[in-house]
């Protein structure tokens, strides 16, 4: 009988041997399945039979290899906080294999926290349970907010412990991604001047992610254009929901335009453009407001790594790269504006929109308002309610002026307030996975107190735009005593 799992169809392993290390996950002690994402499992074609439940725990922990898996750790390099590290790679993640869904979409299934590989350097190859839970909750919430992201299939808790600031139980996350190719994967081969491999990687990436350009003459330039565009859009989407990635190193930037490698990430509560959650980010390099600029910087590293294959003549290649990159600020600003416009109920475009948006952000910063709630408070169901007195702002000249300019702008939409409010309700979430809630979930699960909070936050963030009964607490920002200043640091 087949091991109940997935029909693997692996392709990355067909690339040359130095693209990866073939390695099996290291066993963990007493794996327990804390969460299985049933909908995702179904969409991947995962076969689960109750009688085989134990096997699922064993498989998703890495203790047993399912049929068809061909586990590898992928090689990559990367710029970490601006500094180049020539060899990073999967130091604690092992790719089990790839799956083709019935809709013919290819996904990687990877175990994070699966043990030591040749890329582990001084690391222990493991992931503490806390960050595994955080990644599960946040990545799934991002997915339901319509933001491209890797997804989470399961959380495993084991009886092994690892040392960070304290001793923590180990976890294994199974992560599903449309691939794990990063900007850093390109940097790995480019740095080594391994042009054959660089071409192989670029062709593989084009085949897998951008097949429409594979027969084009200037396909590598088009690859750069595509990767730039989807990643500009990705960051615009993060900004619109107040998401801070936290470690936008080039090894944590996916070629597929998916959010990847959730570490010290968070959704902002009160609005502060300079907000940073990572306790190691002293300079604020990866602050909320810097994310567009940092993506631009990361893409310039991607462009640089493509130079050897953009043209035989390096001057021409450089010009090609610069010509693409110089469009980034415009593309990003347009995508950001489009996303923000939707939040204010604008479906048309007017020149003053930027001013209205930025004045609103200044106001909520000045008043210390919660980012998510402030947008939700802009929704009025009918004309009678649509007045300044029903509005969340303090009564000031500036806020009244802003309200009136927004109201005037909405008149240009030529839609009634009910229709405007309908569209705003579909874009401004009620429920986001707030940091203090995630901390509570982690504490409950680490202390073995059950998974009620986990199930609740997953249920709410699965339908982020729909009010649910008895859930007021989850709408609200933290009370002063609940506020988490840093995210879980030891990942
Ligand atoms: P991250 O900061 O999680 O994106 O990881 C950066 C690099 O460090 C990657 O090459 C990871 O594989 C590696 N790494 C992170 N944590 C560990 C660990 N506990 N053991 C081994 N390698 C790790
Ligand atoms: Mg990483």
Image: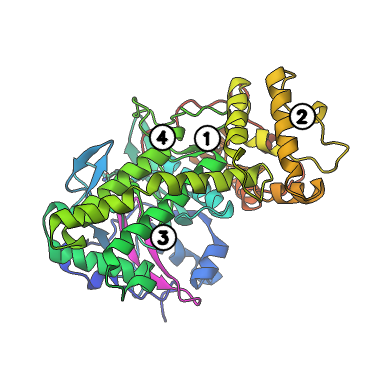
| Marks 3 and 4, how far apart at CA | 25 Å
Disc 1 crowd, CA 10 A, few/some/many (<14, 14-19, 20+): some
Q: Is residue 145 left or right of residue 78?
A: right
Residue at mark 4? 290
* Magenta stretch secondary structure, dominant: strand
Among numbered discs 1 and 3, the one appearing first in the sequence: 3
- The disc at residue 391 is 2
Total count of labels:
4
Is any part of residue 76 visible from this angle?
no
Which residues fall within the magenta stretch?
A: 93-117
Q: Is residue 30 found inside the magenta-colored segment of the image? A: no
In the picture, residue 93 is in which quadrant?
A: bottom left
Among numbered discs 2 and 4, the one appearing first in the sequence: 4
Residue pictured at 37% horizontal, 72% vertical: 211
Q: Secondary structure at mark 4?
A: helix
Residue at mark 3? 177
Residue pictured at 50% horizontal, 76% vertical: 103
Q: Position of residue 252 (x, y in %)?
A: 34, 47
Residue at mark 1? 439
Among numbered discs 3 and 4, the one appearing first in the sequence: 3
Q: Secondary structure at mark 2?
A: loop
Question: Does mark 3 have its CB less than 8 Å from ligand 2?
Answer: no
Question: Does mark 4 have its CB less than 8 Å from ligand 1?
Answer: no
């Amino acid at each position: 009988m087949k091991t109940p799992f997935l029909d693997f169809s692996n392709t990355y392993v067909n690339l040359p041997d130095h693209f990866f290390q073939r390695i099996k996950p290291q066993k963990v002690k007493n794996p327990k399945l804390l969460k299985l994402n049933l909908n995702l499992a179904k969409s991947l074609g995962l076969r689960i039979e109750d009688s085989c439940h134990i096997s699922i725990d064993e498989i998703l922990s890495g203790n047993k290899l399912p049929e068809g898996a061909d586990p590898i750790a992928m090689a990559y390099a990367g710029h970490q906080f601006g500094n180049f590290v020539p060899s990073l790679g999967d130091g604690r993640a092992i790719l089990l294999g790839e799956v083709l869904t019935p809709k013919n979409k290819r996904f990687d299934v990877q175990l994070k926290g699966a043990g030591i590989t040749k890329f582990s350097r001084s690391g222990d190859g493991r992931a503490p349970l806390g960050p595994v839970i955080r990644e599960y909750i946040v990545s799934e919430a991002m997915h339901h907010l319509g933001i491209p992201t890797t997804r989470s299939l399961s959380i495993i808790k084991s009886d092994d412990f690892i040392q960070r600031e304290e001793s923590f139980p180990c976890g294994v996350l199974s992560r599903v991604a449309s691939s794990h190719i990063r900007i850093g994967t390109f940097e790995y081969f480019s740095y080594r001047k391994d042009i054959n491999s660089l071409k192989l990687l670029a062709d593989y990436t084009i085949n897998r992610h951008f097949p429409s350009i594979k027969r084009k003459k200037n396909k590598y330039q088009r690859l750069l254009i595509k990767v730039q565009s989807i990643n500009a859009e990705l960051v615009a989407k993060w900004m619109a929901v107040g998401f801070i990635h936290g470690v936008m190193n080039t090894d944590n930037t996916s070629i597929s335009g998916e959010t990847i490698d959730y570490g010290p990430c968070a959704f902002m509560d009160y609005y502060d453009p300079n907000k940073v959650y990572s306790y190691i980010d002293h300079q604020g390099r990866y602050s909320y407001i810097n994310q567009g600029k940092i993506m631009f910087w990361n893409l310039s590293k991607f462009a640089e790594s493509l130079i050897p294959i953009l043209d035989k003549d390096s001057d021409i290649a450089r010009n090609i790269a610069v010509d693409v990159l110089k469009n980034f600020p415009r593309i990003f600003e347009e995508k950001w504006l489009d996303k923000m416009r939707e939040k204010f109920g604008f479906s048309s475009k007017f020149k003053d929109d930027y001013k209205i948006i930025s004045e609103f952000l200044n106001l909520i910063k000045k008043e210390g308002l919660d980012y998510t709630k402030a947008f939700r408070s802009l929704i009025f169901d009918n004309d009678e309610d649509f007045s300044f007195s029903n509005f969340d702002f303090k009564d000031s000249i500036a806020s009244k002026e802003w309200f009136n300019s927004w109201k005037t702008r909405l008149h240009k939409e030529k839609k009634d307030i009910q229709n405007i409010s309908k569209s705003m309700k579909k874009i401004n979430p009620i429920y986001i996975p707030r940091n203090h809630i995630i901390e509570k979930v982690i504490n409950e699960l680490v202390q073995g107190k059950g998974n009620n909070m986990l199930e609740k936050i997953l249920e709410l963030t699965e339908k982020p735009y729909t009010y649910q009964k008895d859930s007021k607490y989850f709408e609200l920002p933290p009370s002063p005593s609940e506020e988490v200043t840093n995210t879980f640091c030891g990942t």
